Amino acid sequence: DAGVTQSPTHLIKTRGQQVTLRCSPKSGHDTVSWYQQALGQGPQFIFQYYEEEERQRGNFPDRFSGHQYPNYSSELNVNALLLGDSALYLCASSRDRSDAGNTIYFGEGSWLTVV
Amino acid sequence: GQQVMQIPQYQHVQEGEDFTTYCNSSTTLSNIQWYKQRPGGHPVFLIQLVKSGEVKKQKRLTFQFGEAKKNSSLHITATQTTDVGTYFCAALTDSNYQLIWGAGTKLIIKP
């Protein structure tokens, strides 16, 4: 049973460029969340996708956008990259449940360096 | 907005000593989750606590959820080099859609 897979694992981009990160959720999971983790800090919630729609969004600018496909996989797009976007981008998958007992699984992340 | 405060930021211990990290919230939490992140790695789920006063153990790790569901702790007995990493607490928001993370406590084993 494959866990959460993310690609690419590492990438370097130049300021102003655009980047697309990809995530395949754990088998049986239909909900994908994206987090940004700057060095030495805890992850920060970017947004969550469910049923191919953005369900909730954290405090991130519109340069950050996403998509979820019918097979539940997801993409995170960041436009007009800034140096401050350098971080580990984590994808988390879960099954949509309204109770508080929802286990969340994280992928290994995509390390983005903006130069 | 909802916040989770975690202390200390770092803890240096000799191998064999105990380690404890604490999380606090000003609001009642529906649940609290604990994660471990090794250097250069990704967060790995350790445990979830949902009940008031809950205590769970995993070998040398003991997790507690406060009676008021506003605080939690992780205690490691007799630390080993394999315990090195950063330990995060995280709480689901009321909507259960996002995790709010503490800043993490980095466990460092003194040489």
Image (tube, coloured by chain):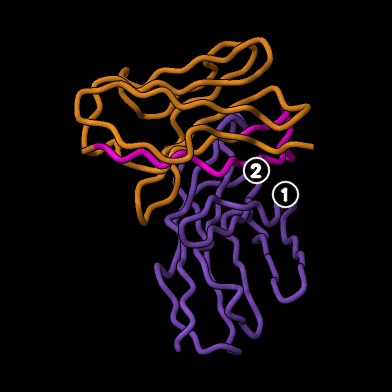
Name the residue carrying label 2.
B30
As shown in the figure, which amino acid type bears the numbered disc 2?
Ser
Q: Identify the element where label 2 is drawn.
A: loop
What are the residue bounds of the magenta stretch?
A93-114
Answer whether residue A113 is magenta in the image: yes
User: In the image, residue B102 lies at what x, y percent?
Assistant: 47, 53
User: In the image, residue A75 lies at what x, y percent?
Assistant: 50, 21
Q: Which shade of the palette goes to chain B?
A: purple
User: In the image, residue B48 lies at what x, y percent?
Assistant: 70, 51
Residue B41, relative to residue A43: is it above or below? below
Q: Where, quadrant-wise, is the C terminus of chain A in this rendering?
A: top left
Residue at image coords 66%, 47% = B31
For residue A69, which quarter of the picture? Answer: top right
Say whether residue A11 is left or right of residue B25: left
**Mark-to-mark CA distance, 1 and 2:** 6 Å
Answer whether residue B58 is magenta in the image: no
Residue at image coords 76%, 68% = B58
Indicate the chain coloured orange by its letter.
A
Task: Report how many numbered discs are placed on residues in the image.
Answer: 2
As shown in the figure, which amino acid type bears the numbered disc 1?
Val
